[in-house]
Image: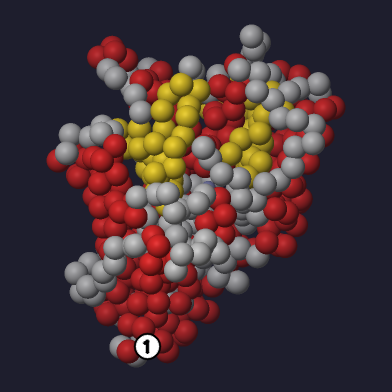
Amino acid sequence: MPGSGLILGIESSCDETAAAIVERGSRTVSSVVASQIATHARYGGVVPELASREHLRAIVPVVRAALAEAHITLADLDAIAVTSGPGLAGALLVGITYAKALAFANHLPLIAVNHLEGHIHAVLLNERETEAAPGADAAHEKSVTLRDDSALALVVSGGHTHLYLARPAQGSWNYTLVGRTVDDAAGEAFDKVAKLLGLGYPGGPWIDALAKFGNPNAVPFSFAQIKTKAHLGGKPARTKAAKTAPIARLDPHFLFSFSGIKTAVLRYVELHGLRAEAKARVSRVLNSFRPPQSREEACALCPQPTLDLIASFQHAVIGDLMKKTFAAAQSLGTRQILVTGGVAANRELRERFTREAAARSVRISFPTLALSTDNAAMIAAAAWPRLLARDFAPPELSADPSLALS
Ligand code: KG4
Ligand code: ZN
């Protein structure tokens, strides 16, 4: 049985170097995230080689800062947890190698965590922290919690748009893949559309901030229903996402595709003569990493047709995520939905999912904004059931860029 219950989590799967200390999977003692946004912004996307180099620079100070913020030393820990995949191979290796060395030198067990399971545990960690908060009333404590029943989890980020049925099983969780994207992830579509409109990286926060100043019904984007066999022409998909999970056995109603809307936005930009002004925006945006905060700032940056295009794009993507997620929940008879990952930080997404869930009497949960995007608290939280089950990583643990969750 663990002593202190303290786990150091380390996350380096993409462009954030993060470390956190979480107690018994239910209390964040410290959480430090070093973002590489400034490094990748000028390229409009993550450059894997630069990401590995930045992780190498940041990993030691970030872990030290997490320990210092928690006022503990390595001797106080019960285990070290690290993301082993999916993600960028070189980036993952930095975290894994450092975690292995720390665990070996300090005689601590090492726990390998799937990044996607981490995102799901971000919501569970939040729920436990809310329950334990001083103001939480007795009624709330007695109410049914997310942990008591199965839940449909939409993990929607820059690398994934996956639907899992998560079921509690003897203190741990089982996951069944229900649906996923056949090409781009939703966050990737936000990033690519932002890039072609001359906005900053990552694109999600820019689109989110600008969409509220546009008309969401100005451009009628539509999503065709995906037919598995027709879409693939009978062959396995060759995308990165496809490697992590086969799609042939999934219900086509729960499959997503976001590469088409990106092309539709590009066509619209060309047809409506918005290309030149998008190009002109790039240098202005590079000088300010902050998305506009007011209508004045938004209008100074983008003409109204571009704001309308942005609002329509976001509205269409969120509508598609909603339609398929609620259909899957209904088909599986699940009364709980959780939405997590970077795109779950989106304001319109939270509002519309919350409204729809209320209309259908379905329980909906999101992580806090800080826990929506990549962090290490979610990794340390996901490791807690593993520590209880003494499910430790082998000494030969290595990065698995296309690690599946099931
Ligand atoms: O979970 P995350 O930090 O990293 C991955 O695991 O991919 O997600 C990053 C993604 C990026 O594509 C970013 O544009 C998107 O999440 N994102 C958002 C928002 N904040 C971040 N997308 C829409 N609205 C937002 N507010
Ligand atoms: Zn992530």
The residue drawn where x is 26% and y is 41% is 331
Residue 161 visible: no
The residue tagged 1 is 270
Question: In terms of image quadrants, where is residue 42?
Answer: bottom right
x%, y% of residue 288?
A: 50, 68
Amino acid residing under circle 1: Glu
Question: In terms of image quadrants, where is residue 44?
Answer: bottom right
Question: From the viewer's perspective, is residue 227 above or below residue 219?
Answer: above
Q: Is residue 294 left or right of residue 20?
A: left
The residue drawn where x is 72% and y is 62% is 49
x%, y% of residue 24?
A: 55, 19
- Helix, strand or loop at mark 1: helix
**Which residue is farthest right?**
105
Question: From the viewer's perspective, is residue 36 above or below residue 41?
Answer: above
Please, which colouring scheme is shown?
A: secondary structure
The residue drawn where x is 65% and y is 65% is 47
x%, y% of residue 43?
A: 60, 72
Residue 55 visible: yes
Instruction: Return the residue nearer the eye: 111 or 134.
Output: 111
Tell me the quarter of the image containing the N terminus: top right
**Which residue is farthest left?**
359
**Which residue is farthest front?**
234
**How many neighbours does mark 1 have within 10 angstroms: few (below 14), some (14-19), or many (20 or more)?**
few
x%, y% of residue 290?
A: 46, 62
Instruction: Return the residue nearer the eye: 397 or 377.
Output: 397
Number of numbered discs on residues? 1
The residue drawn where x is 34% and y is 24% is 149
